[in-house]
Structures are given as structure tokens and as C-alpha cells.
Amino acid sequence: MTCEIRKWKLSDAKDLAAALSNKNVQDNLRDGLPYPYTDQDGRDFISAMNSASEDETFAFAIVAEGRVIGSIGAFRQGNIHRRTAELGYYIAEPYWGKGIMTEAVRQICEFIFERSDIIRIYAEPFARNTASCRVLEKAGFQCEGTLRCNAVKNNEVLDMKLYARLKTI
């Protein structure tokens, strides 16, 4: 199954809310997202992403089969890390395991490396999220190590993995 990444539209809010109103999806994300996730939450997020600096925030909807099925974004870091961006993503559960996220990660990396001065993109999935780790590996990221006891999610202390992909210079 193929996908494309594109800029967000306010009309995507309903599909976004459907993807994020799933505990299995949210269990693999950082805290701070409302649950259940409403259409208004989606509109607020889309408005924020569309008004953010295009040189600081690279935020896209993931589209497959003519509808939004997920989100992917990379966020420029500051100070001495100003040419580094942190990657985050999720996809609706019915689309897990179909290769879509790997393709979306490849697309955003190509976009960022071609259109910005970013030289390093990194991600920190929970170590137990082997599917997300595999996505990154298939998209050309290398595991740089395990961040032990690095997060608390649902009252559980978790390890995270650090993955990075570098721009070919």
C-alpha cells in the first residue's frame, strides 16, 4: 500500500480524531494528547501546525486510500542542536504492518534533507515498540543506543531507543 505526505487541511480533523481516539495508538505516544481525541482537538492541532514556522516545524498528514490515516512531523531543535530535528509519527491501527509508515518516514526525511539545512533527524520510540523500531531501521535510521528508564508511560518506567538518520553530505 502506498501513501503520500501532505500539508494539513482543517477538513482532516475528523480523520485525525478517529486515528487518535484509540488507546492502542496513544499507548505508543508521549503524554499530553486528549483522550478521547475530538474533531476540535484535531482542528486546534492542524491550525497550530499550519501556523508554525516552516523552517522549524515540518508537519504532514499521512494519506492513503484517499483519506488521512496518520500524522508525521519533525521539529527543529535549538542552540547547538539547531541542525537536528526530532521525528514523531503515528498511524491509525487498521493500517499497522502494511509498510505505510516506513514510506512516510522515508518521504519526510527526503523532504527535510532536500529543503532545509537539517543534517540529522532522530527519533526515540519506546524500546518495547518493536514495530516502530523496525520502521526506522527500514527507513535508513541507525540505532545509537538504549535510553534506560527514560520515560514513564501509564505508570510504567520504560526504556527508549535512540535512532538517527544523517543527511549524506
Image (cartoon, rainbow, N blue to C red):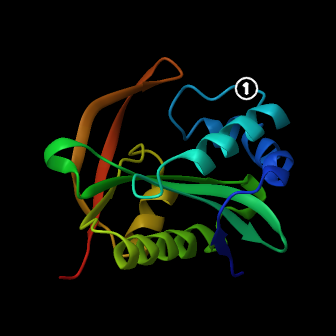
Q: Position of residue 1 (x, y in %)?
A: 72, 81
Residue that sits furthest to the left in the current view: 80
Q: Which residue is mark 1?
A: 35
Q: Is residue 61 above or below residue 168?
A: above
Residue 42 in sight here: yes
Residue that sits furthest to the top in the current view: 155
Residue 38 in sight here: no
Q: Residue at x 69, y 57 (%)?
A: 8
Most foreground residue, 2 or 75: 75
Q: Is residue 142 left or right of residue 52?
A: left
Most foreground residue, 73 or 89: 73
Identify the amino acid type marked 1. Tyr
Q: Residue at x 37, y 79 (%)?
A: 114
Q: Is residue 126 above or below residue 98?
A: above
Most foreground residue, 31 or 151: 31
Q: Position of residue 89 (x, y in %)?
A: 54, 53
Label 1 environment density (alpha carbons within 10 Å; few <14, some 14–19, many ≥20): few
Give the number of marks: 1
Q: Is residue 2 above or below residue 150?
A: below
Question: What is the quadrant of the C terminus in the image?
Answer: bottom left
Q: Residue at x 67, y 61 (%)?
A: 96
Q: Residue at x 61, y 40 (%)?
A: 48
Q: Quadrant of residue 42?
A: top right
Q: Position of residue 112 (x, y in %)?
A: 40, 70
Q: Is residue 40 above or below residue 138?
A: above
Q: Position of residue 74 (x, y in %)?
A: 44, 55
Say which element carries label 1: loop
Most foreground residue, 21 or 154: 21
